[in-house]
């Protein structure tokens, strides 16, 4: 039986770089791995791009309505692996469908994404993945203070914010994200008016 994997970490920990390296490794060994990502992630359009500058076009942009189990059940060629970028933006039913892809269709599914948002609330898809994944791996990052970064800080015009919509893609000039440790997150939260 194939497995459903969840590899998560705070912003800038190398999730997309690891995904692209995994895709390269499959390709180098003559196997077919495809990259998918949620269509709601408008950053970089139909590409995945690591902060190191490596990029690749995705094989499938996933709309909220797409049944991933049915899609891959009827896929027109053999697949050795499905790689999912920004998995936190999928729907809960799509996570359940990916679980079935691994278990029923025997195709490994490796998901990369965030566990929590900028308020420290779980993304519904990530919470479901934590329940269903056969293998869960935390990818590490470091806060500017030197401690392990586990939180995602949303910056609006350079100022930390703790209110707003769960999903705001950082493809604009005024929204950005920064990985910080729990202590820095709480210090900034308690000193903010947001």
Image: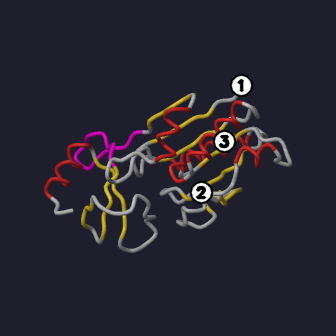
Say if the magenta span includes residue 143.
yes
User: Where residue 88 appears, x then y in whole percent?
Assistant: 50, 49
- Provide the secondary structure element on which disc 1 rests: loop
Is most of the magenta stretch helix, strand or loop?
A: loop
The number of discs equals: 3
- Provide the secondary structure element on which disc 2 rests: strand
Segment colored magenta: 140-151
Q: Badge 3 is on which residue?
A: 97
Q: Nearer the viewer, residue 14 or 77?
A: 77
Q: Which mark is residue 89?
A: none
Residue lying at 30% horizontally and 39% vertically, measured from the top left: 148
Q: Residues within 10 Å of mark 2 (few under 14, many from 20)?
A: many
Q: Which mark is residue 1?
A: 1
User: Where residue 12 appears, x then y in whole percent?
Assistant: 42, 51
Decide which of tag 1 and tag 2 comes sooner along the chain.
1
Q: Nearer the viewer, residue 27 or 168?
A: 168
Residue lying at 53% horizontally and 49% vertically, measured from the top left: 17
Residue lying at 36% horizontally and 59% vertically, measured from the top left: 177
Per the model, the C-alpha gap separating discs 1 and 2 is 26 Å
> In the rendered view, would you say 77 is above or below 60?
above
Q: Nearer the viewer, residue 111 or 119?
A: 119
- Provide the secondary structure element on which disc 3 rests: helix
User: Where residue 49 appears, x then y in whole percent?
Assistant: 55, 59
Q: Are marks 1 and 3 in contact (CB under 8 Å)?
A: no
Q: Residues within 10 Å of mark 3 (few under 14, many from 20)?
A: some
Quadrant of residue 106 within the rendered picture: top right
Per the model, the C-alpha gap separating discs 1 and 3 is 15 Å
Per the model, the C-alpha gap separating discs 3 and 2 is 14 Å
Q: Which mark is residue 38?
A: 2
Residue 178 falls left or right of residue 146 = right
User: Where residue 96 appears, x then y in whole percent?
Assistant: 62, 39
């Amino acid at each position: 039986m194939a497995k459903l994997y969840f590899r998560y970490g705070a912003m800038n920990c190398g999730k997309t770089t690891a995904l692209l390296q995994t895709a390269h490794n499959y390709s180098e060994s003559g196997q077919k791995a495809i990259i998918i990502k949620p269509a709601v992630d408008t950053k970089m359009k139909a590409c995945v791009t690591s902060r190191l500058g490596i990029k690749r076009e995705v094989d499938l942009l996933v709309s909220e309505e797409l049944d991933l189990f049915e899609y891959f059940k009827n896929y027109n060629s053999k697949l050795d692996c499905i790689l999912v970028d920004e998995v936190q933006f999928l729907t809960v039913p799509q996570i359940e469908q990916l679980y079935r892809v691994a278990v029923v269709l025997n195709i490994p599914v490796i998901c990369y994404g965030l566990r929590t948002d900028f308020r420290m609330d779980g993304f519904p898809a990530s919470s479901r993945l934590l329940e269903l994944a056969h293998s869960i791996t935390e990818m590490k990052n470091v806060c500017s203070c030197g401690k392990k970064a586990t939180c995602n800080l949303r910056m609006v015009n350079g100022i930390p914010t703790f209110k707003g919509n769960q999903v705001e893609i950082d493809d604009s000039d005024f929204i950005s994200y920064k990985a910080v440790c729990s202590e820095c997150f709480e210090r900034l939260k308690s000193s903010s008016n947001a």
